[in-house]
Image (cartoon, rainbow, N blue to C red):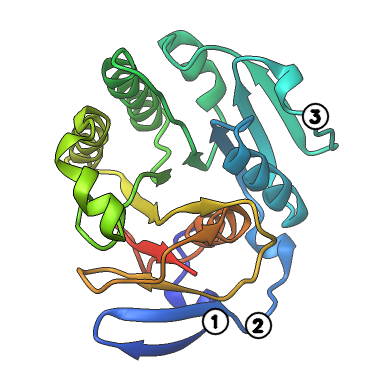
């Protein structure tokens, strides 16, 4: 995990701080495989993460509330049933891991505190067992042009509920203040389209195209396990 950046070969065309990003070179899976803990594994993006991680040769621990929601079976897949709000369950799942990928999401007003509690438990267990790499899925930043394009979105924007965004920002600030090697992956509108393995990444305020497939997001998140390119950054993704 601590090998240099050139482990990942990429093709880049750039304008400002936006790059078009895609794989150009296959690497030996056995050289990259690690024990990996995935939270939110039964969600739509989480299932993409599990399937791709297994295909890459990782040993995957999928932390889920209901194992029936993850209909995937594989010799290298360990499904752990538990509640991320239970620190003991999170602690037990963290033992022996090398990295954590989170695709957690909570909705509703109670989701604010639940999200922060879940993050606290995950990060406490990571630091206890010296697991340093955290790849976390998050919404795009609340900037006009990324999350509310079009005339209707602009007209409705002042009346839309801002609490969910504020909850996420509190969680992300908590992660940013940690000593972990975190990457906050912020895709634009998620779709269920097939993977293209060609998309744009912005690490500043430069806009990227609206929309990206969950499969491409999963690919990008897993690539951050073996690259330091975006460590302690919040890349925005668009297709």
Mark 2: give few (<14), some (14-19) or many (20+) Cα within 10 Å. few
Q: Position of residue 54 (x, y in %)?
A: 74, 48
Contact between labelled residues 1 and 2, with CB atoms less than 8 Å apart: yes
Q: Residue at x 77, y 54 (%)?
A: 55
Q: Position of residue 106 (x, y in %)?
A: 41, 24
x and y percentages locating residue 207 in the rendered image: 29, 71
- In the rendered structure, which disc, 1 or 3, sits on the residue that comes first in sequence? 1
Q: Is there a contact, CB below 8 Å, between mark 2 and mark 3?
A: no
Q: What residue does disc 1 label?
A: 9
Report the residue marked by disc 2.
25
Q: Which mark is residue 71?
A: 3
**Disc 1 on helix, strand or loop?**
loop
| Residue at image point 21% right, 53% down | 154
Q: CA distance from mark 1 to mark 3?
A: 33 Å
Residue at disc 3, secondary structure? loop
Q: Earlier in the sequence, mark 2 or mark 1?
A: 1
Residue at 34% x, 31% y is 127
Can I make out residue 155 in this image?
Answer: yes
Q: Which residue is at 27% across, 68% downward?
A: 203
| Left or right of 217 on screen, residue 57 | right
Quarter location, residue 36: top right
């Amino acid at each position: 995990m601590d090998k240099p950046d050139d482990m990942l070969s990429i093709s880049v065309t750039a304008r400002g701080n936006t790059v078009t990003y895609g794989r150009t070179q296959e690497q030996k899976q056995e050289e990259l495989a690690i024990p990996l803990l995935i939270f939110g594994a039964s969600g739509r993006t989480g299932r993409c993460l599990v399937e791709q991680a297994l295909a890459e040769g990782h040993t995957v621990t999928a932390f889920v509330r209901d194992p029936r929601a993850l209909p995937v079976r594989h010799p290298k897949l360990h499904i752990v049933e538990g509640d991320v709000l239970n620190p003991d369950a999170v602690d037990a799942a963290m033992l022996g891991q090398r990295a954590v990928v989170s695709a957690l999401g909570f909705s509703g007003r109670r989701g604010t505190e639940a999200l922060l509690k879940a993050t606290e438990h995950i990060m406490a267990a990571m630091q206890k067992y010296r697991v340093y790499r955290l790849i976390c899925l998050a919404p795009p930043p609340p900037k006009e042009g990324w999350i509310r394009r079009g005339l209707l979105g602009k007209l409705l924007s002042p009346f839309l509920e801002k609490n969910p965004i504020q909850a996420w920002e509190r969680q992300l600030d908590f992660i940013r203040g940690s000593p972990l090697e975190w990457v906050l992956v912020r895709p634009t509108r998620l779709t269920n389209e097939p993977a293209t393995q060609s998309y744009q990444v912005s690490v500043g305020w430069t806009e990227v195209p609206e929309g990206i497939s969950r499969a491409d997001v999963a690919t990008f998140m897993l690539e951050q396990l073996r690259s330091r390119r975006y460590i302690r950054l919040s890349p925005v993704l668009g297709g």
